Amino acid sequence: MPVTLKDAKHIAELARLEFSGEELESFTHQLNQILEYVEKLNELDTENVEPLSHPVEGNNAFREDELKPSINREEALKNAPDRDEEFFRVPKVIG
């Protein structure tokens, strides 16, 4: 079922977008080309193809958790523009 100019206007309205008449005609044509391509995909024989949840099988690339030493508090706070003994002081951002 081809997309009409009326359909394209409705889609633009739903997306809260404004287009000129020329742009709407162009988008209508482009949407119809996309639908033709998808229809072409429907011609493929997928009878013996297993459905996939993802097109590429991937393995987790997580590293092992390792305990590593951290910098001490004084080192972390030494370049802070404003601090309160052992904490960073930041401006209030929520009223």
Image (cartoon, rainbow, N blue to C red):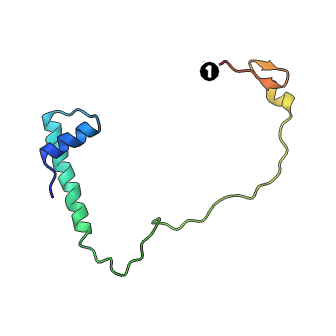
Residues 34 and 11: in front is 11
- Tell me the element at label 1: loop
In percent of width and height, residue 16 lies at 28, 34
Give the quarter of the image for residue 52.
Answer: bottom left
Question: Is residue 95 shown left or right of residue 81?
Answer: left
> Which residue does the numbered mark 1 point to in the structure image?
93
Horizontal arrangement in the rendering, residue 82 relative to residue 9 (left or right):
right
Question: Disc 1 residue type?
Answer: Val
Where 91 falls versus 67 (above or below)?
above
Q: Viewed as shown, does residue 79 lie left or right of 25? A: right
| Rendering coords of residue 26 (x, y %) | 16, 43
Task: Give 57 or 51, whichever is nearer the viewer.
Answer: 51
Q: Is residue 74 above or below residue 71?
A: above
At 60% from the left and 18% from the top, the residue drawn is: 95
Q: Residue at x 14, y 55 (%)?
A: 2
Quadrant that contains the N terminus: bottom left
Q: Residue at x 84, y 25 (%)?
A: 86
